[in-house]
Amino acid sequence: MASTQGGALFGAPYRSREGLSTRPVSNSNEVQVQIDPVHADLDQEIVGLHRKVKQLKNVAQEIGSEAKYHNDFIAQLQMTLLKAQAGVKNNVRRLNMSIIQQGSNNVLHVVLFCLFLFFVVYLLAKFFRR
């Protein structure tokens, strides 16, 4: 949308009813404000701008506090995960030690069972040969 303000042609995406208009500048962080003194009630425009700036400030503060809350939550979650990981590592180490100890006992039990079966088969073979 193009409008004539004070003899110049400007694209005004934000325009008030009283003659205040804004347009973006080459740098996207800046906005130029042009006031048409013929149609403007400057006091109302300034109050309106002040209100908008306050709203933007409040929004920025809310975003900042929300970001801080989420950062604290993420840090707390990371600590919880690190503690859980340490607990799991400790339990896996204990389980491995237990398996190693039980594994050697199991081998002993299997060897003894095999010897017992061999002895029983030997005795049965001797007994039934007669």
Image: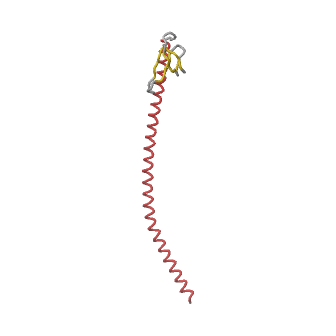
Residue at x 45%, y 31% (from the top left corner): 65
**In terms of depth relative to the viewer, which is nearer, 49 or 3?**
3
Colouring rule applied to residues: secondary structure
Q: Position of residue 57 (x, y in %)?
A: 46, 24
**In terms of depth relative to the viewer, which is nearer, 68 or 17?**
17
Name above or below for residue 20 compared with residue 91: above
Q: Quadrant of the C terminus?
A: bottom right
Residue at x 44%, y 50% (from the top left corner): 85
Query: How many numbered discs sit on the rendered protein?
Result: 0
Residue at x 48%, y 11% (from the top left corner): 37
Q: Position of residue 84 (x, y in %)?
A: 45, 48
Q: Quadrant of the N terminus?
A: top right
Name above or below for residue 83 compared with residue 47: below
Q: Position of residue 101 (x, y in %)?
A: 43, 64
Name above or below for residue 70 compared with residue 124: above
Q: Position of residue 18 (x, y in %)?
A: 53, 13
**In terms of depth relative to the viewer, which is nearer, 18 or 70?**
18
